[in-house]
Amino acid sequence: MDITLQTKIEHPYIEKVEGSCGGKAKIKGTRIKVSQIAVEHIDMKMDIDEIVKSHPHLHYWEIYDALSYYYENQTEIDEELVEEMKFVKKMISKWREDYLQKISTTSVWSEEQVSLIENAGKELNKWQIPK
């Protein structure tokens, strides 16, 4: 017989506040989202010391609580990250289109600048965003 203990873990340093950080989980009294800490630790391979050095106003216990919250709510936070990535990709695409249009109507841009903007689109297409 498999018995799984379901215990709600308290996260004293995490809050969700309507109108702050889009209502997403964040470290209390800051605008640092749990997802940001998770990305720094998991994707950027930063250890806890590096994260604290990057955010000197945070304490170790807040970082550990953020990571604990992330692992407890991983599906929800990963979905938020995917939505944010889609938004960023959309904004970069729009920026690129706007600048390519401006470039075509003016001669102040050098060939090198045009090439950089065109290549930004190629790099953007390499992003792997989960469906």
Image (spheres, rainbow, N blue to C red):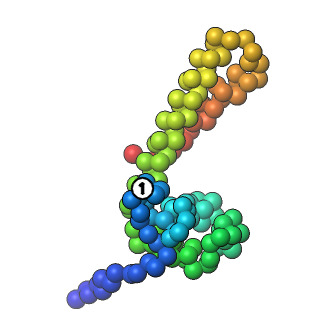
Hey, which residue is sitting farthest left in the picture?
1
Nearer the observer, 118 or 62: 62
Q: Residues within 10 Å of mark 1 (few under 14, many from 20)?
A: few
**Residue at image location 46% in from the left, 79% down from the top:** 12
Residue 93 appears in the picture as rendered: yes
Above or below, 125 relative to 8: above
- Left or right, 99 with reference to 15: right
Above or below, 55 relative to 121: below
Residue 74 appears in the picture as rendered: no
Q: Amino acid at mark 1?
A: Gly
Residue 88, percent across and down?
52, 41
Question: Split into 4 quadrants, where in the image is the N terminus?
Answer: bottom left
**Residue at image location 46% in from the left, 72% down from the top:** 14
**Residue at image location 65% in from the left, 70% down from the top:** 57
Residue 39, percent across and down?
56, 60
Count how many numbered circles sit on residues in the image. Answer: 1
Question: Mark 1 highlights which residue?
Answer: 19
Residue 107, percent across and down?
73, 11
Q: Quadrant of residue 53?
A: bottom right
Question: Split into 4 quadrants, where in the image is the C terminus?
Answer: top left
Residue 122, percent across and down?
60, 31
Nearer the observer, 78 or 19: 19
Q: Quadrant of residue 18?
A: bottom left
Q: Secondary structure at mark 1?
A: loop
Above or below, 2 relative to 28: below
